[in-house]
Amino acid sequence: MPLGLKKRDFLLIGIAILILAFLLQAPPESTSRVPFDDDHKQYYDIVKKQGKKAAEKFCEECHNPDTVPFPEGHPAKYRCLFCHKMQPS
Ligand code: HEC
Ligand code: HEC
């Protein structure tokens, strides 16, 4: 085998490619951005200082079926900021 790769290594590479393909197909550029308004302004600061994961914890305080419902057929809800980008500053 060239480079000493084993069958198992090719399997792992294949799995890695599949995961990458899955992640890359997710964020189409058309996904609406997080508004820069009074509801969302504070999260721009949190993202900058503590990262996206820290900010996302708060999204569902409002974005839930009772307060601000998601549009019908909304994809998986975790990791909001993976798909919804912040406004360019
Ligand atoms: C205090 C309540 C509140 C919190 C917390 C909140 N949102 Fe919102 N969000 C709203 C409301 C109300 C709207 C609809 C009105 C508007 O566009 O501002 C909205 C709209 C949106 C929209 C749609 C904008 C558009 O173009 O239609 C996105 C995307 C969004 N929020 C993402 C987020 C994300 C991501 C977080 C967490 C970082 C978050 N929101 C946290 C209240 C909130
Ligand atoms: C896998 C990608 C993905 C994730 C993760 C995701 N969304 Fe969305 N979201 C979309 C798409 C696609 C739409 C429909 C197109 C659009 O309006 O942006 C949408 C629409 C919305 C809308 C309505 C926007 C409008 O214009 O009316 C809101 C609000 C929203 N998402 C908030 C959130 C919040 C809050 C989270 C995290 C709890 C989240 N989304 C996670 C992809 C995603």
Image (cartoon, helix red, strand yellow):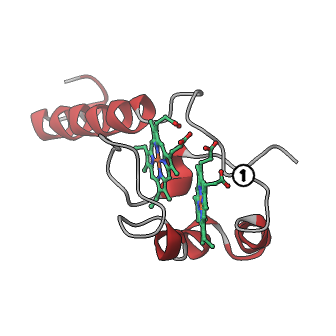
Q: Residue furthest top?
A: 2
* Total numbered labels placed on residues in the image: 1
Q: Is residue 21 left or right of residue 35?
A: left
Rendered view: 46 above or below 76 = below
Q: Residue furthest left?
A: 7
Location of the N terminus (image quadrant):
top left
Picture residue at 79% right of the left edge, 55% below the top:
36
The front one of 62 and 83 is 62
Q: Is residue 55 left or right of residue 26?
A: right
Residue 62's spot in the image, x, y percent? 51, 71
Ligand 1 within 8 Å, label 1 CB: yes
Picture residue at 35% right of the left edge, 64% below the top:
65
Residue 87's spot in the image, x, y percent? 77, 46
Picture residue at 79% right of the left edge, 67% below the top:
38
* Residue ID for mark 1: 35
Task: Give the image quarter of residue 81.
Answer: bottom right
User: Which kind of residue does numbered mark 1 sit on?
Assistant: Pro
Q: Residue furthest right?
A: 89
The front one of 7 and 61 is 61
Q: Secondary structure at mark 1?
A: loop
Q: Within 10 angstroms of label 1, few (less than 14), some, or many (20 or more) residues?
A: some
The front one of 53 and 73 is 73
Quadrant location of ligand 1? bottom right
Picture residue at 37% right of the left edge, 36% below the top:
20
Residue 27's spot in the image, x, y percent? 49, 35
Rendered view: 73 above or below 79 = above
Task: Give the image quarter of residue 14.
Answer: top left
Residue 60's spot in the image, x, y percent? 46, 71
